[in-house]
Each structure stands twice: as C-alpha cells, then as structure tokens.
Amino acid sequence: MNRKSGFRGNTHRVVFLALFALACVLLIAGAAILKVTNDDYASLSDNVITLSKGVAYGLLTTGSLIVLLTLTGSIGACTRHNFSLNIYIFGMAIIFIAALAGGIHFLIQLRSNANQWSSLTISDWQSFTDADRDTDQFLFSCCGFGANQTGIYSGTPLYDSSSRSENSCASSDFVATAPNCYSSGNSFYNHYTVISGVVFGGILLFVLTGIASADHAKFRTVDVGYQVVHEGFVQV
C-alpha cells in the first residue's frame, strides 16, 4: 500500500472513531436527561417532562443507531465490502434527514417561544400565578418584570419546593443585582437558539463527513490494486 492510500485509510478510521465518540456522547446525554426527568418528576411540569423525555429518547435512539452504523461502516472500510458501506451510507443519510427535520422543527418551536416571551407585557406578568412567576424567576435567575422589576414574587418557594429552602428574590440585596425577567428571558432564548443551532449544525456536519468518507472508501482500493465487489475482492 502506498503512502497516499495509507493516509486515506487513516482518515477513514479517524472519521469513524469521531462518529463513534459522538454517538457515545449522545447516549450519555440521553441517559442523563432521562435520569433527571425520572428523579425530579414531582418538581417539573408535565410539558417539561414530555419534552425532556422526547429529547432523551431521541438522543438514545440516534446514538444507538450511529454506533451500529459506525461498526458496519468500519467493517466495510476495513474489508473493502461495498454492501456494508452502502448500508452505512443509507442509514447515515436517514439520520441526516431526520436530524435536519427535527432540528428545524426544534429551532422553529424555540423561536416561537422566544417571540411569545418578547411580546409579554407587565400586565401579562401580573396575571401569572405565583407559582408561574416563581418558576420563571428561578429558571432565569431574575426578579420581577421590566425595568422597574414589577411584580416580584418574594414568598415561599413554590417551584421545586422540596429542594429550595428560600426564595432568592426575598432578599433585597439579591434583587438589587438581579436582572429583570423580561431581559433575562430574552437573553436566555437568544443564547439557547445560537447554542442549539451550533450543536445541530455540528451533528449534521459529522454525519455528512461520515457519509463522504464511506463513499470515498468504496473507491480507495484503486490505489492498492484491488477492485471492490459485493462478495469480496477481485485482483486486477
């Protein structure tokens, strides 16, 4: 095998190892999210539980499929077996389409929630229940709404009351330094959208790189004097 084909072979191995590592990260993240939602079910709202479990199951499924497909692709690349590589390419293409569609849907929903939050008024905030305001103040690390921090909930903790002994917004020192919930919520959604977009983009880039690497591996044997067939090798 010449130096050029050896370099290409190493590149394929690096790509497959990177995809395997990505799959492991997705599996760990999915398991962690599922554990949190199961352990803290009483302190989380039903819609958060449903969304979190959906994300967890999606990560676990995607990670498992990438592991299986990466093993198949690695075997195909090492044995120069086109059928295995074609299975890998087809499976990764399905994952790419599903991840693209899911990512677009997620980002659209996220921006919809962001727009709803940015359109809130002080009257809307004051119409919230104490539990809703306490939840938002805790999740966004803020107190009150608007420039004047109107409608601060400073009573006993209502959100995740089993693990919170006090309400931070009951302290005047904390209120003096805390942002208002309107600004904090907008900042959260903006940062979350950017981070989510980067994560989805990175996953899609990894998957595309794997597909391109597998497709290239189908023709790599030309460099070393072999012709690839579905059943094995034919010396040329």
Image: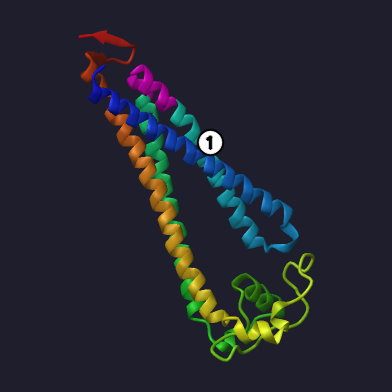
Seen in the picture, residue 130 relative to 58 is either above or below; the reply is below
Q: What amino acid type is highlighted by mark number 1?
A: Ser
Residue 75 painted magenta = yes
In the picture provided, is 99 more to the left or to the right than 160? left
Write down the residue under mark 1.
64
Residue 182 painted magenta = no
Seen in the picture, residue 55 relative to 215 is either above or below; the reply is below
Q: 102 or 38, which lies in front?
A: 38
Residue 219 can be seen in this image: no
Say which quarter of the image contains residue 124: bottom right
Give x and y (percent) for residue 10.
34, 28
Q: 36 or 65, which lies in front?
A: 36
Q: Which quadrant would the N terminus be assigned to in this image?
A: top left
Say which quarter of the image contains residue 103: bottom left
Give x and y (percent) for residue 203.
42, 47
Label 1 SS: helix
Give, as a single range, the part of the protein colored magenta: 72-84
Q: Residues within 10 Å of mark 1 (few under 14, many from 20)?
A: some
Q: Which quadrant would the C terminus be assigned to in this image?
A: top left
Name the residue furthest front. 3
Give x and y (percent) for residue 73.
40, 27
Seen in the picture, residue 82 relative to 117 is either above or below; the reply is above
What residue is at 68 percent from the left and 85 percent from the top? 173
In the picture provided, is 178 more to the left or to the right than 112? right
Residue 74 can be seen in this image: yes
What residue is at 46 percent from the left and 27 percent from the top? 71
